[in-house]
Image: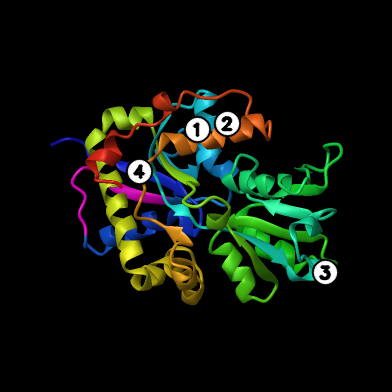
Amino acid sequence: MAEKPTLKIGHLSITDHLILGVTDLKLKKGAEKFEHCTLQTVLKNGWNEVADSLSVKSLDGAFILAPTAMDLFKSGVAIKLLLLTHRNGSILVKNKRAHIEKIEDFAGKTVLIPYQLSIHNMLFHKLLSEKGLKPGRSVEPNIDVTLEVVAPFQMPEALQYDEDGEIGGFIVAEPIGSQVIASGLGEEFYLSKDLWPGHPCCVFVMRDEIIAKYPDAVQELTTSFVKSGKAIDAQPDPAAVIGSKFLSQDVEVVRRVLTYPPDRITTSELFPVLEDLATIQKYMMDKMKIMTTLIDLEKFVDTSFAIAAGAK
């Protein structure tokens, strides 16, 4: 009998990672059985924690921001991108106290982003650049909008304590944005799907040595994620109930994220498209200067598991 490993998969408490929660619940309830591995979900507080845990090999795999995964790969962390975990699903929220009516009103304000190497940073940069505004960290010269990296779960609190409206808002994965809107502190300014329709964001990566040692287990996991993704899109109501438990969020907030509008986040098309990833790294290198070299995406992405799983 072959050894049955426990695969530790890191994630954050965001809707982008809901396919992991659905798979986890199916296993716990016996609705699905794994022959080749046991799944252990590992909740992390912020993106730096996920990245560090992959680097030191305390995780076998993770749901992580695509550009962050690329950067880890570039720095020599032996990982492969196997699957997208969703498309769309983020939101730019304006702080009600900041009196933002149009993009230009973000000038002179601070905007919170979840991580430097994130789609969120890229989409916000694109939005501002089109209006001739320059975002950057407070230490950079001649910037119009100050960017501050804050872990997603801490963003609602940051807005709560910002009595003078110095924070213009934030761009982040759901359901953080909808949670703040429901609390009355913020208002929707843009959905990420309207800035780049069908954009990738978080991806599922595994360490090379785990893929080499337990290919059947990795396939089993990938196939389950693809099924879970299709189930969420097909049945958002039960998915919202699972999501509220997995994300410790109000069920109505999660339901709204999954249904209104229907393509706010999609989980049924998880096949990793190299052109999309190329767009991200090229923009971050040419326009944002936060990536210094391009990685070889053919070496970083392994689509064989997604193909076998029937990912679209």
Q: Would you call the spot at circle 4 few (<14 residues within 10 Å), some (14-19), or many (20 or more)?
A: many
Q: Which residues are magenta?
A: 32-41
- What's the CA distance linking mark 4 and mark 2? 20 Å
Marks 1 and 4, the one that precedes in the sequence:
4
Which residue is the site of mark 1?
278
Residue type at numbered disc 1: Ala
At 31% from the left edge and 43% from the top edge, which residue is drawn? 6
Name the image quarter holding the N terminus: top left
- x, y percent for residue 293: 59, 23
- x, y percent for residue 197: 50, 52
Assign a secondary structure to mark 1: helix
- What's the CA distance linking mark 2 and mark 1? 6 Å
Task: Tell me, yes or no, whether the highlighted magenta stretch contains residue 39.
Answer: yes
Assign a secondary structure to mark 4: loop
At 70% from the left edge and 53% from the top edge, which residue is drawn? 112
At 82% from the left edge and 65% from the top edge, which residue is drawn? 165
Q: Would you call the spot at circle 1 few (<14 residues within 10 Å), some (14-19), or many (20 or more)?
A: some
The color scheme shown is rainbow
- What's the CA distance linking mark 3 and mark 4? 43 Å
Which residue is the site of mark 4?
271
In the image, taking residue 213 as reference, residue 178 lies left or right, namely right
Could you say which disc has been placed on residue 282 in the image? 2
Name, please, the residue furthest toward the left. 1
Residue type at numbered disc 4: Phe
Q: Tell me where residue 194 sits by quadrant.
A: bottom right
- What's the CA distance linking mark 1 and mark 4? 15 Å
- x, y percent for residue 273: 40, 38
Which residue is the site of mark 3?
163
Name the residue nearer the viewer: 67 or 159.
67
